[in-house]
Image (cartoon, grey):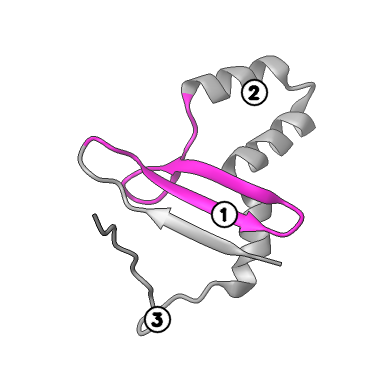
Amino acid sequence: MLRFEITEDPSPGMDGQRFCHAPGLGLWRASTSANGDIVVSEDQLRTLAANAKGSEAFAHRVEQLLGAAWDDALEPFRRAGDGAPVTWLHRVG
């Protein structure tokens, strides 16, 4: 029953990351660019192109790489806009 989304902003020399979890889907992770877009690597694209058995399989795998099912599952729980509460987690060392 646990649902969550965690984003790590990029820092100098490091991509950002996004982690999502939804019941029935499990955990999904991707690197993100400076503006928050999902980054798909060259190796992921080459593997996708080599293994896709047609356009529908290709499109389905792209949706998986972009985390579309997790977005759909988490969207009802997201709140955005001016004044929306945000919880910032900081590393304590």
Residue lying furthest top: 50
| Nearest the eye: 83 or 87 | 87
Q: Residues within 10 Å of mark 3 (few under 14, many from 20)?
A: few
Q: CA distance from mark 2 to mark 3?
A: 38 Å
Vertical comparison of 66 with 23: above or below: above
Instruction: Give the mark nearest the N terminus, 2 or 3.
Output: 2
Instruction: Give the mark nearest the N terminus, 2 or 1.
Output: 1
Q: Which residue is mark 3?
A: 85
Q: Position of residue 87 (x, y in %)?
A: 38, 73
Q: Give the residue at x 40% y 82%.
A: 84
Q: Residue 7, labelled with which disc? A: none
Q: Residue 48, labelled with which disc? A: 2
Q: Which residue is mark 1?
A: 20
83 vs 55, left or right, is left
47 vs 29, left or right, is right
Name the residue type under label 3: Pro
Write down the quadrant of residue 22 in the picture.
bottom right
Q: Residues within 10 Å of mark 2 (few under 14, many from 20)?
A: some
Q: CA distance from mark 2 to mark 1?
A: 22 Å
Name the residue type under label 1: Cys
| Nearest the eye: 31 or 63 | 31
Which residues are drawn in magenta? 13-41
Assign the N terminus to one quadrant of the image.
bottom right
Residue 18 sits inside the magenta stretch:
yes
Name the residue type under label 2: Leu
Q: Give the residue at x 62% y 19%.
A: 47
Q: Nearer the viewer, mark 2 or mark 1?
A: 1
Write down the quadrant of residue 72 in the picture.
bottom right
Residue 93 sits inside the magenta stretch:
no
57 vs 15, left or right, is right
